[in-house]
Image: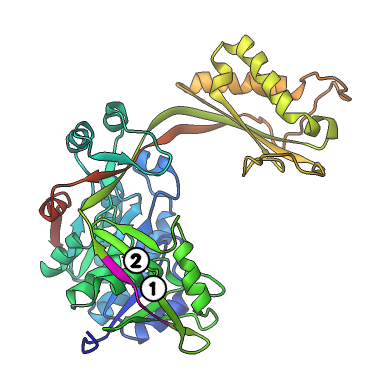
Amino acid sequence: MSKLEPVRLMSASGQLGYGVLKPAFERGLAHEPHMIGADMGSVDPGPAYLGMGKMATDPEITRRDLTMLLEGARGLGVPLIIGTAGTAGAAPHLDAVLDMVRGIARDRGLSFKLASIRADIPKERVLQARRAGELSPLGAFPEATDADITESPHIVAQMDEAPFVAALEGGADVVIAGRACDTAIYTTVALMRGHDRALSTHMAKIIECASLCCDPGGRDSIMATLDGDGFTLDCMNPDRHASPTSVAAHALYEQGDPFTVREPGGELDLSKAVYTALDEHRVRVSGALWRDMKPSLKLEAAAPAGFRCAFFAGTSDPRVIERIETIWTEVKSIVSGLAGEDAGDLLRARFYGLNGVVNWPSPPDMPPREIGILVECVAPTRERAKAVITVTKQYFLHHGFPGRLSTAGNLAFPFTPPELEVGPAWRFSLHHVMQISDRAEMRDLFPIAYEDL
């Protein structure tokens, strides 16, 4: 393995569309990478973008990022690989990014072969898996129902590197994919050049977040140089440094078990990984192991949950803060009597300063001087949500309780009208793993299309 030619892989951005820092990117180009890659999305922005088929990023900044990467890759004549196009990687997200790429190629006079890979999974295939007992929830998600599947506008699966490899073997210069494993963006070229799967996957797992693994962490471009025995990490921003501690700590990123990373075709074992400082700026990594497993796919989908209205308020009255949970329970009961018996079930409150972020098991020893109150109502219709949140606002403002000082109002609103129509509400309907028959089906589920620009 040590006789393999080193391969340089540059991660231009861990979240394309939020801006690429030009100095680090240009420094990376000067190192002449063998490929340039970027991840463009995930489920992190929540279910709404997947359900609505819309991008979370600003179109102009996204276009600027894509232009920088396209010109950089074509200038070097190396592959550009982008995964999870347009935030969520469903058909409308992919199509939006492809339209941008075509426009950039036309405006900038770029010529290349473009491959696009779709990640949308037919609902009938998912229903078949559910009925066969081959669909398993991840984490605290419940078992999927037929309605979860049929009511979801878009169902996507995370592809591995196989479709990317096929696209490059088909002559593509630029590959834009729907929902994809972040690691697949970078393992593609490494595996095509004969490098070890374990090392390639470990390397990819780190650099897909760009310089987040550095100290201080950031979003600058990062270069990984992979050889037969390990890989070296070199941030293209000289002020961000990869250390053994900062890189090893990255194994905790989005992982319940820092030693085990599950991928579509197997499992990465990091229990014997070694992190060695080469200097104050670079780290060399080795020791990862790989275990093949039966292929499976992570599915993601979002389904409509109704319409959301909300209001935000605050209070500095210690009497209100002391009994806010009781006040809220009483207000919900009053609202149910006034706006319909189900109204209380449509409401949710968060008390920032007490338990808005974490549901703490016990109250603080010293109550805060003031708290922020966010109340939302998710109802089947816009009209119902607006009606319930309006009634709730009024009776929360004037709720009477023992020891109340002010009858004029117990809440302060930062703006008026306080009722906000947030819009359609979405829920994750699928966050499940689907077993598939073999690697051949893995390829068939992700069709590739080519076009010459």
Mark identifier at residue 272: 1
Towards the viewer: 364 or 149: 364
At label 1, the amino acid type is: Lys
What colour scheme governs how the chains and residues are painted in the rendered image of this protein? Answer: rainbow
Residue that label 2 marks: 269
- Res. 79 in view: no
Q: Are marks 2 and 1 in contact (CB under 8 Å)?
A: yes
Percent across and percent down for residue 245 are 52, 75
Apparent side of residue 386 relative to residue 76 in the rendered image (left or right): right
Is 288 included in the stretch rendered in magenta?
Answer: yes
Q: Can residue 372 be seen in this view?
A: yes
Measured as percent of width and height from the top left, residue 164 is found at: 20, 63
Q: What residue type is labelled 2?
A: Asp
Which quarter of the figure has residue 334? top right
Q: What residue sits 64% from the left and 19% below the top? A: 332
Please, what secondary structure does the residue beneath circle 1 have?
loop
The part of the chain drawn in magenta is 284-290
Q: Residue at the location (47% across, 73% down)? A: 247
